[in-house]
């Protein structure tokens, strides 16, 4: 009987050790923080705002249905200042502060097939609502929203191997399995029905992805 008990214990101990090994577990969530340049689809943007692009910052949270497929939500902020046209009105304005706040729901496929994979491509898309606000000097503020869609894709580069001790600390302290640096291109279309003005555009972004 003693030999049988020892044999059972010998079989269970390695199994328990493997179950506790984080490398055998899988992340369930993705958190992205990113920023870059946004090129509006509005014609002659540089004429009114002095440049053909402006800043774009965003963050997203997604749940992994399986290791490669996730669904999530993203919010962003785009802002510029210049001499512009009020969206939907076609009126030349004075000094203008132009702001966009895109809110998106998306499905994303990440081509990851190994937890040690250092380069991961991804592609996704979904629904977008683009909120806009334009503060015009000596005039009323113009605001509204338009519904549309977006597609995006990019490459993510694993940072875990650069500093393995830091990666281990991130897991032990915050439950972060993997940290990636990524670059991304995103195209959004969101037209105002009343004026056929596309509030979307193309964004080129970079940021950090945390999987936990």
Image (spheres, helix red, strand yellow):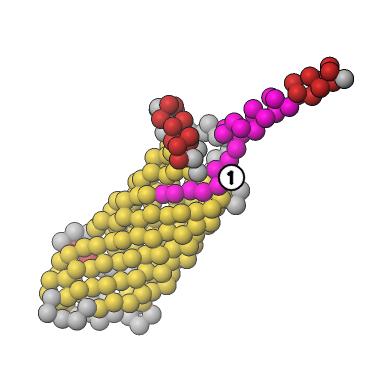
Query: Which residue is rendered at x = 40% and y = 65% of the image?
Result: 103
Q: Does the magenta stretch include residue 162?
A: no
The span picked out in magenta is 12-32
Q: How many numbered markers are drawn? A: 1
User: Where is residue 173 shown, x and y percent of the image?
Assistant: 45, 37
Vertical placement of residue 190 versus 181, above or below:
below
Determine whether, in the image, residue 96 is placed left or right of residue 132: left
Q: Which of 142 and 83 is in front in this view?
A: 142
Query: Which residue is rendered at x = 70% and y = 25% of the image?
Result: 13
Q: Which residue in the protein does label 1 denote?
A: 67
Query: Which residue is rendered at x = 42% and y = 59% of the image?
Result: 74
Task: Work out whether residue 120 can be spotted.
Answer: no
Vertical placement of residue 168 versus 82, above or below:
above
User: Where is residue 151 shown, x and y percent of the image?
Assistant: 45, 58
Q: Nearer the viewer, residue 151 or 73?
A: 73
Going by the picture, which residue comes out furthest to the right? 1
Crowdedness of circle 1 by 10 Å Cα count: few (<14), some, many (20+)?
some
């Amino acid at each position: 009987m003693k030999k049988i008990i020892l044999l059972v214990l010998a079989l269970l101990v390695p199994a328990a050790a493997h179950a506790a090994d984080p490398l055998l577990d899988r992340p369930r969530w993705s958190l992205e923080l990113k920023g870059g340049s946004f090129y509006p689809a509005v014609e002659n943007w540089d004429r009114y705002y002095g440049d053909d692009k402006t800043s774009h910052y965003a963050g997203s949270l997604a749940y992994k249905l399986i290791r490669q497929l996730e669904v999530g939500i993203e919010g962003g902020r785009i802002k510029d200042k210049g001499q512009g046209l009020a969206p939907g009105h076609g009126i030349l304005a004075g000094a203008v502060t132009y702001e966009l706040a895109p809110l998106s729901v998306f499905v994303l496929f990440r081509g990851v097939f190994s937890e040690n994979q250092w380069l991961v491509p991804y592609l996704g898309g979904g629904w977008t609502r683009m909120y806009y606000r334009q503060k015009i000097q000596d005039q009323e503020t113009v605001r509204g929203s338009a519904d549309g869609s977006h597609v995006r894709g990019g490459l993510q580069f694993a940072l875990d191997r650069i500093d393995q001790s830091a990666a281990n600390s991130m897991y032990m302290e915050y439950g972060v399995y993997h940290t990636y640096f990524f670059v991304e291109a995103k195209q959004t279309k969101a037209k105002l029905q009343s004026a056929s003005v596309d509030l979307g555009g193309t964004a080129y972004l970079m940021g950090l992805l945390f999987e936990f």
